[in-house]
Amino acid sequence: MRLIDTHSHLYEPEFDEDRDAAVERARAAGVERLIFPAIDAESHGRMFDTARRYAGYCAVMMGLHPTSVNDNPRWREELAEVEHYLTTTPPEGIDRFVAVGEIGLDFYWSRDYIEEQREAFLVQLRLAARLGLPVAIHTRSAWPEMVEMLEREARAAHERGERLCGVLHAFSDGVESYRRLLKAGDFKFGIGGVVTFKKSPLAEVVREMALEDMLLETDCPYLTPAPFRGKRNESGYISYICQKIAELKGVGADEVARITTENARELFGL
């Protein structure tokens, strides 16, 4: 199988002791590419250094994570840095940025920064549409707000002669949101380790989803799939996610891998 982990934080400190080995395990599992989502300025250096270390294997995004807006007096400056990265020559050793991400809304930890998060999200959505880049969207405890904003912004982009497209990273809402987002724009849905959990409500949604709407992701070192739940996640475990989706859809794992890999290549221009 040839797989793409469309959301990997391999650059985070959790991999400092065995990063090379984790990459080798991913390659052995059939993972042909990793895509790194950006978080904020504090982690850009680690992300770039890791991408350079495995040149040709790792692609990178650029964006400001919603929780990095919270209680951050520099968040508007960081947004300006994101735009600078996306509109000028990439850093040395970085071919290009394949998406604006990860961006979005996260009201889980606090609802004190809703307006700031909405502003940062809108700025980045509109920047992505203007530049013709996909977005990678993080959502936690904010699904009604997210669906409404994407419906509105996708319409506005269309009216401007632009296109809003991307992936709903770690999709965890219900069938109704899936259907509404399909109608709203050209969106894919990132399916990760949660789908392997016992009694996961995501399993029922995946049964309805078309494979052409899915991307595979790990979000490592987080959201570890069964049978490794409770341990650090890594990109090599994406094969377990692929197999679970195959079981839910009643198809072969090779077919899931083939279609979701092609989806990723097309969306991110790989």
Image: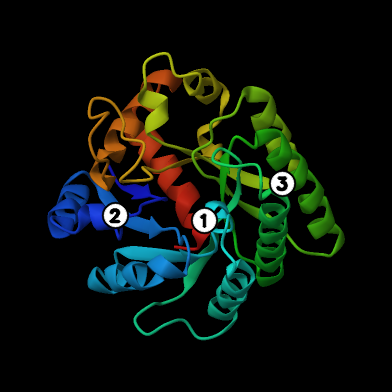
Q: Which quadrant holds the C terminus?
A: bottom left
Q: Marks 1/2: CA distance?
A: 15 Å
Establish if 26 lies above or below 140: below
**Residue at x-position 51% and y-position 56%:** 266
| Residue type at tag 3 | Gly
Label 2: how many Cα within 10 Å (few below 14, some 14–19, many 20+):
some
Secondary structure beneath label 1: helix
Q: Position of residue 161 (x, y in %)?
A: 82, 64
Q: Which residue is mark 1?
A: 266
Secondary structure beneath label 2: strand
Establish if 30 lies above or below 180: below
Q: Position of residue 3 (x, y in %)?
A: 33, 46
Q: Position of residue 215 (x, y in %)?
A: 47, 42
**Residue at x-position 53% and y-position 56%:** 65
- The mark closer to the camera, 3 or 1, is 3
Q: Earlier in the sequence, mark 3 or mark 1?
A: 3
Q: Which residue is mark 3?
A: 185
Q: Earlier in the sequence, mark 1 or mark 2?
A: 2
Residue 115 at least partly seen? yes
Q: Marks 3/1: CA distance?
A: 16 Å
Q: Do callouts 2 and 3 mark residues in contact (Cβ within 8 Å)? A: no
Left or right, residue 106 beside residue 114: left
In which quadrant of the rendered view does residue 122 lie?
bottom right
Residue 250 at least partly seen? no
Left or right, residue 231 beside residue 222: left
Q: Which residue is mark 2?
A: 32
Q: Which quadrant holds the N terminus?
A: top left
Label 1: how many Cα within 10 Å (few below 14, some 14–19, many 20+):
few
| Residue type at tag 1 | Glu
| Residue type at tag 2 | Glu
**Residue at x-position 54% and y-position 64%:** 63
